[in-house]
Amino acid sequence: MLNIYTNALSYRHDTGFGHPESARRIDAALDGVGRVGLRSLILADSALHPDTERMIARVHSADYEEELDEACQGGFQFFHSLDNPISPSSSAAARAAVGTSLSAADEIWRLGGSKRAFIIARPPGHHAERVEAMGFCFFNTIACVAEWLRELPGIERIFIFDFDVHHGNGTQHLFEERDDVFYASIHRYPFYPGSGAADQIGRGYGRGFTRNYPMEAGLGDAPYLRTVEDDLVRIIDDYRPQAILLSAGFDAHRRDRLGGMGVTEKAFGTITRRIVECAERHCEGRVLSLLEGGYDMEGLAASVAEHLNAMNGG
Ligand SMILES: [Zn+2]
């Protein structure tokens, strides 16, 4: 019922010494998988979904993709910002994160082999804009999955919930003028990347289909849980999505020094349970969750364990 995926290329995006977004995060997340007695499927690079390239081209410009590939061929350097160091395999890793996620989505929504999936891949994606790499992100993976799902018959409304401690500026901007992909985010504010104020609610046809829950630093579990249970659940129930996608960042965890939000792993479990209940009401329990941030290894492992326990129906 729950499939967990990772890929070998996630280890080969080398961000250099001391960078918080390192390959150790994959091991920490896999540690979390083991703690709840689950196992992950390691997708071979050759098994990446055939629509990978087409979906990246849908979300990003050809010039941007080419620029990233060329920069990676040039070896270790920064791409667009000091937050985004790259190495020769970085664009391949970013592509593999998209391909792995599409394979997971295909299994759930087209083949029907599972109801839920968690994808452990890096680099993360929610800060990536159409033509700009930001905040450790290069390709906006969850946007690629949403675009792919929109091509399936019967999938007309997709709900993305982003609980990474940072606002997913890239995902919001990509969908803020559309009503077929609802983007909701709970995040520390004001904080990196600067977007995500409560009055950002979408534009044009998308007005009312973006929802931001800005939170002051260090508030801990209570306001997070209250927001999800009192407001987010109602919004999902009103929208009646045929697919629910999660930008699952665990950098709001209390051990995470980058996040500074003070949330416990138990709260991540509770939030996940509420989302799964929404999915049971509207989309046969189908949820795809994608690892975004999370930079304290123990906090990440513990949070992933609680998240997966809830995704698995526990
Ligand atoms: Zn983050």
Image (cartoon, rainbow, N blue to C red):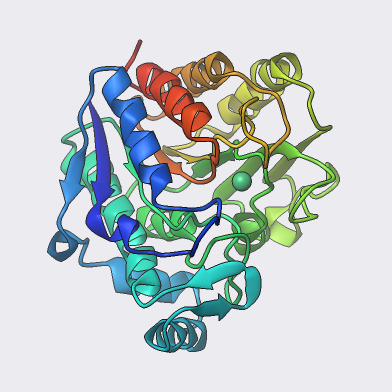
Residue at the image position 64 percent from the left and 32 percent from the top: 252
Q: Which of 133/298 is in front? A: 298
Q: Which of 15/30 is in front? A: 15
Q: Is residue 94 above or below residue 186?
A: below
| The furthest residue to the front | 17
Quadrant for the C terminus, please.
top left
Residue 152 appears in the rendering: no
Quadrant for the N terminus, please.
top left
Q: Is residue 59 above or below residue 75?
A: above
Q: Which of 270/299 is in front? A: 299
Residue 103 percent across, percent down from the top left:
24, 52
Does residue 237 appear to the left or right of 291 in the view shown? right
Q: How many marks?
A: 0
Does residue 137 appear to the left or right of 6 in the view shown? right
Q: Which of 10/53 is in front? A: 10
Residue 97 percent across, percent down from the top left:
35, 57
Residue 167 percent across, percent down from the top left:
69, 48
Residue 304 appears in the rendering: yes
Q: Is residue 292 above or below residue 123?
A: above
Residue 266 percent across, percent down from the top left:
54, 14
Residue at the image position 48 percent from the left and 54 percent from the top: 124
Res 108 → quadrant: top left
Residue at the image position 54 percent from the left and 40 percent from the top: 294
Q: Is residue 237 above or below residue 60?
A: above
Res 3 → quadrant: top left
